């Protein structure tokens, strides 16, 4: 579809620009303060888990399968918590460590351990030259920030509709021993919302890395976060590894952050027997044991995968109208103009928006001036550098529907304004 503004005569474009100017002035006078920046659950979503707080009282039996949750011990996590965590990922509980309250902390610890001490008998990364991580982009800004904070070089990898460009991933992982990891959000990716296809998962499982200390950092943050039926189905990476007889290749992460209470939940890592043994030892220097009281409350409240699915349906009932609103408003406001595209994910927390080259920063800046906070343009790329300046991550869960409605009206005007101005500028040179 062609860009509407390109089809206008100079006079028509000027008329359009002056109408947009008027709309901008009207919006400015409203002095809005709306936030679509981060993927935070709405308070009503968090409230769904308040009954979990009643699972623990002074009269509660804190013993879980013979383990006293109210004392030291069980550094690998409470048995019921491991059971639940394993069930959600489809792995054996012995291959899961439930060790923290949020998954990013575990990812940090895992990378910190490889960086400082080394894994698989290799030299620590801090003593190796030019350590690199592959970063499918657009992707999750905190992943990229984490590896960048260690001085690891983040290398962007093109993201497609069914996962990262696997030809490129295979080439780099299999030929360059400085490549030590790849960040993946395989289901309802942050921010594109896509789920990796079975073929992509199988190609990951078949990787033959040049570096023995290479791992796939499989952040399955949205493993149960479906909002539409039929939901996306992600092939179990550990089953795919088994199919090809591979091992010691994947660390899988997840947490209850967007199931129960963000930052106050339980988080876990799943890996092969060898990797779990190494991580158990590495983590033993960091903590005597995790917060097993929180784990007990979670295990008793969430129980099993079936109960979690029921609980997630309640989240979906709150999130779906927001996703639908964003998509229908973008469609109505921009659909016929041929100037942008956006995703319509069946789960997760984000909608990914792409405008024309050179537009994203200007759109985000203008929206901010008008009182609508968006994720910084470029944040979805390593070092904040979106090479074509097109991508904007929309996070629709936190605002109320009314706020979202208003924020989208502003966003749409900003997109039109910026794109029309780009067209005007291109005619002036
Ligand atoms: N991974 C991804 C892909 C996320 O989007 C988020 C939250 N925005 C996290 C991890 C953070 O999860 P946690 O609270 O468990 O650290």
Image (cartoon, grey):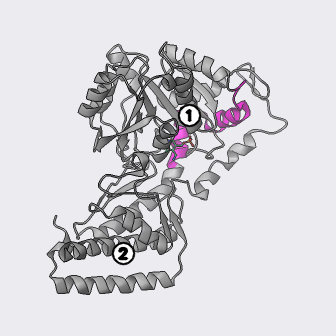
Which residue appears farthest toward the right when viewing the image?
58
User: Marks 1 and 2, Cα distance to the nearest angstrom?
Assistant: 40 Å
In the displayed structure image, the side of residue 47 where residue 72 appears, left or right: right
Q: Quadrant of residue 63?
A: top right
Query: Considering the numbered disc 1 on the image, is that residue within a helix, a strand or a loop?
Result: helix
Of callouts 1 and 2, which one flags the residue occurring earlier in the amino acid sequence? Answer: 1
Magenta span includes 24: no
Residue tagged 2: 413
Residue tagged 1: 108
Which range is magenta?
287-313
Q: Residues within 10 Å of mark 2 (few under 14, many from 20)?
A: many
Report the label total: 2
- Magenta part mainly helix, strand or loop? helix
In the displayed structure image, the side of residue 361 where residue 121 appears, left or right: right
In the displayed structure image, the side of residue 398 where residue 8 appears, left or right: left
Give the residue at x 52% y 19%.
Answer: 118
User: Front-most of 105 and 113?
Assistant: 113
């Amino acid at each position: 579809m062609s860009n509407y503004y390109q089809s206008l005569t100079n006079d028509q474009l000027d008329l359009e620009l002056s109408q947009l100017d008027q709309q901008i002035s009207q919006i400015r006078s409203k002095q809005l303060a709306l936030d679509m920046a981060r993927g935070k659950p709405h308070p009503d979503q968090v409230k769904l888990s308040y009954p979990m707080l009643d699972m623990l009282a002074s009269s509660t039996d804190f013993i879980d399968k013979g383990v006293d949750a109210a004392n030291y011990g069980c550094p690998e996590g409470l048995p019921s918590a491991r059971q639940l965590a394993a069930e959600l990922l489809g792995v054996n509980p012995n291959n899961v460590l439930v060790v923290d309250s949020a998954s990013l902390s575990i990812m940090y610890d895992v990378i910190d351990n490889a960086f400082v001490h080394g894994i698989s008998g290799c030299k620590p990364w801090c003593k190796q030259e030019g350590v690199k991580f592959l970063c499918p982009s657009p992707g999750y800004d905190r992943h990229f920030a984490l590896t960048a904070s260690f001085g690891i070089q983040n290398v962007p990898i093109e993201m497609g509709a069914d996962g990262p460009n696997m030809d490129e991933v295979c080439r780099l992982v299999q030929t360059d021993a400085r490549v030590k990891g790849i960040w993946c959000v395989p289901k309802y990716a942050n921010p594109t919302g896509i789920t990796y296809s079975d073929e992509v998962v199988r190609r990951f499982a078949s990787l033959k890395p040049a570096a023995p200390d290479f791992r796939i950092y499989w952040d399955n943050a949205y493993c149960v976060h479906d909002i539409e039926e039929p939901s996306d189905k992600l092939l179990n990476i550990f089953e795919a590894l088994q199919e090809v007889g591979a091992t010691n290749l994947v660390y899988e992460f997840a947490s209850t952050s967007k199931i129960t209470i963000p930052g106050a939940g339980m988080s876990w890592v799943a890996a092969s027997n060898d990797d779990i043994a190494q991580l158990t030892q590495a983590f033993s220097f960091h903590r005597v044991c995790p917060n097993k009281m929180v784990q007990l409350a979670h295990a008793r409240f969430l129980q099993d995968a079936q109960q979690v699915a029921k609980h997630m349906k309640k989240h979906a009932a709150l999130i779906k109208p927001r996703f639908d609103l964003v998509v229908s408003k973008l469609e109505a406001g921009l659909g016929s103009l041929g100037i942008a595209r956006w995703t319509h994910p069946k789960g997760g927390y984000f909608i990914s928006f792409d405008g024309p080259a050179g537009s994203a920063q200007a759109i985000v800046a203008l929206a901010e001036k008008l009182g609508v906070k968006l994720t910084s343009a470029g944040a979805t790329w390593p070092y904040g550098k979106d090479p074509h300046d097109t991508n904007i991550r929309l996070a629709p869960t936190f605002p109320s529907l009314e706020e979202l409605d208003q924020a989208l009206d502003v966003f749409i005007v900003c997109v039109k304004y910026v794109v029309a101005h780009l067209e005007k500028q291109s005619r002036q040179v």
